[in-house]
Amino acid sequence: MFKDNVLKKMLIFIADDDETNLKLINTVLKQDGFTNIRTFTSGKLMLADLRHNCPDLLLLDIMMPGYSGYEVLEWIKRDSTLEHIPVIMITAVSLDENLEPLKRSFDLGAMDFISKPFTNLELVLRVKSALRLEHSRQALEDAALKISSLEKLLPICSYCKKVRTDKNYWQEVEVYISEHTDTMFSHSICPDCYHTHVKPQIENLKKNK
């Protein structure tokens, strides 16, 4: 179960060329406790900010001059660094009159769709639902990164220096590396080992002659 205070700190972008609608959406969300909201009066202004900031949710009015909501959505979904952002499309067109905006929005990759006029409760519930899904996606992504990092840890014996393989048995380091990479080993002797191991053996042989 998500705590609301976690969701309400997530970053929300809202774009609508009608400043009255923009203020209404902003006010409704703030009254419900959302604290991290940025508003834009055009799709162009939102896109400019998206180049520097990555929100957790976008609310896009469809009919905007310059860049329409459709064009902004299409641009976002073409960008591999932004395509994961959930988008809720907003329109004044009644679904009873025309289902094309709904179909086109989902075809372009929108997560949800709201028709004006909407109730305050509907807006808040849809926003919370989208943020819950995005929070879960981020948590899964973080977990995958941690797992990937753990996979790079290679257990090695403190004494014999053998490593533990995925099959849970111990193997010489050079054998393990040769089997998992294209690296080939040519054996030699480092200066420290020469003085510690080889030189005493040579001197001992000389004494025994």
Image (tube, rainbow, N blue to C red):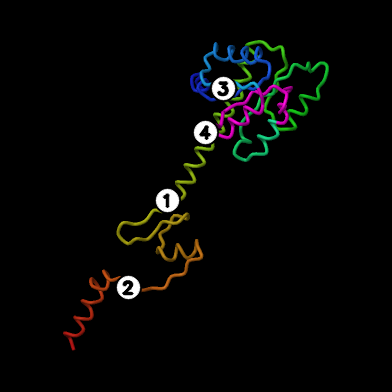
Circles 1 and 4: CB atoms closer than 8 Å = no
The residue shown at (40%, 63%) is 173
Query: On the image, numbered disc 3 is attached to which residue?
Result: 38
Q: Work out whether mark 1 precedes mark 4 in sequence or the reverse, and give the earlier one.
A: 4
Position of residue 141 measured from the top left corner of the image (x, y, whole percent):
53, 38
Type of residue at label 2?
Answer: Ile
Q: CA distance from mark 2 to mark 1?
A: 27 Å
Q: Quadrant of the C terminus?
A: bottom left
User: Residue 35's spot in the image, x, y percent?
Assistant: 51, 18
The residue under label 2 is: 189
Give the alpha-carbon distance from disc 4 to disc 2, as whole Å.
48 Å
| Disc number lying in front (3 or 2) | 3
Task: Give the residue type that dot 4 points to.
Answer: Ala
Circle 4 sits on which residue?
A: 139
Find residue 21 and report its image quarter. top right
Q: Which numbered disc flags the more N-terminal residue, 3 or 4?
A: 3
Residue drawn at point x = 68 percent, y = 30 percent? 72
At a point 34% along the width and 57% down the height, the residue shown is 157
What's the CA distance linking mark 3 and mark 2?
A: 64 Å
In front: mark 3 or mark 4? Answer: 3
Mark sitting on residue 153: 1
Reply yes or no: does residue 58 show up in magenta. Answer: yes
User: Between marks 1 and 3, how big is the CA–CA gap?
Assistant: 41 Å
Q: Residues within 10 Å of mark 4 (few under 14, many from 20)?
A: few
* Label 2 vs 1, first from the N-terminus: 1
Identify the magenta region: 42-71
- In primary-sequence order, the first of circles 4 and 2 is 4
Q: Relative to 168, is 79 above or below?
A: above
**Distance between the Cα atoms at labels 1 and 4?**
22 Å
